[in-house]
């Protein structure tokens, strides 16, 4: 099972780390990615999918190598774009 403590979280780092630790204690697997891993622009440039940063996080974890599937593991990724006003491709 996967657990997302949130992107661009306004909480102190120690709080976010503790949330991830609690999730792991409950049996969830956590993966850490940085803003530099987010792939909104790459998704648009390559396949014309508009995604918000949070909506591309799981895909970014795969592409960056932060998450490596186990042999034979089937992986599904949901990419969403509900908050696309936060993405300004012209500024990048």
Image (cartoon, rainbow, N blue to C red):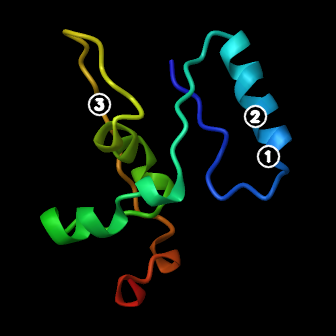
Relative image position of residue 40 (x, y in whole percent): 36, 64
Nearest to N terminus: mark 3 or mark 2: 2
Relative image position of residue 48 (x, y in whole percent): 18, 69
Residue 15 location, quadrant? top right
Q: Quadrant of the C terminus?
A: bottom left
Neighbour class for label 1 at 10 Å: few (<14), some, many (≥20)?
A: few
Q: Which residue is found at the position 70% from the left and 28% from the top? A: 20
Q: Is 7 positioned to the left or the right of 78 in the image?
A: right
Q: Is 12 positioned to the left or the right of 47 in the image?
A: right
Residue 57 vs 3, above or below: the answer is: below
Residue labelled with disc 2: 17
Q: Is 56 positioned to the left or the right of 50 in the image?
A: right
Q: Which residue is found at the position 85% from the left and 50% from the top? A: 12
Q: Nearer the viewer, mark 3 or mark 2?
A: 2
Relative image position of residue 32 (x, y in whole percent): 55, 37
Marks 1 and 3, how far apart in space? 29 Å
Marks 1 and 2, how far apart in space? 6 Å
Residue 20 vs 90, above or below: the answer is: above
Residue labelled with disc 3: 76
Mark 1 and mark 2 in contact? Answer it, CB < 8 Å. Answer: yes
Marks 3 and 2, how far apart in space? 25 Å
Residue labelled with disc 1: 13
Neighbour class for label 2 at 10 Å: few (<14), some, many (≥20)?
A: few
Depth order, front residue of 52/15: 15
């Amino acid at each position: 099972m996967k657990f997302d403590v949130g992107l661009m979280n306004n909480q102190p780092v120690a709080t976010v780390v503790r949330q991830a630790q609690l999730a792991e204690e409950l049996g969830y697997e956590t993966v850490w990615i940085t803003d530099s891993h987010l792939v909104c622009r790459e998704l648009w440039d390559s396949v014309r999918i508009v995604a918000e940063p949070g909506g591309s996080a799981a895909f970014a974890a795969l592409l960056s190598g932060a998450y490596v599937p186990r042999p034979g593991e089937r992986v599904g990724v949901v990419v969403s774009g509900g908050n696309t006003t936060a993405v300004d491709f012209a500024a990048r």
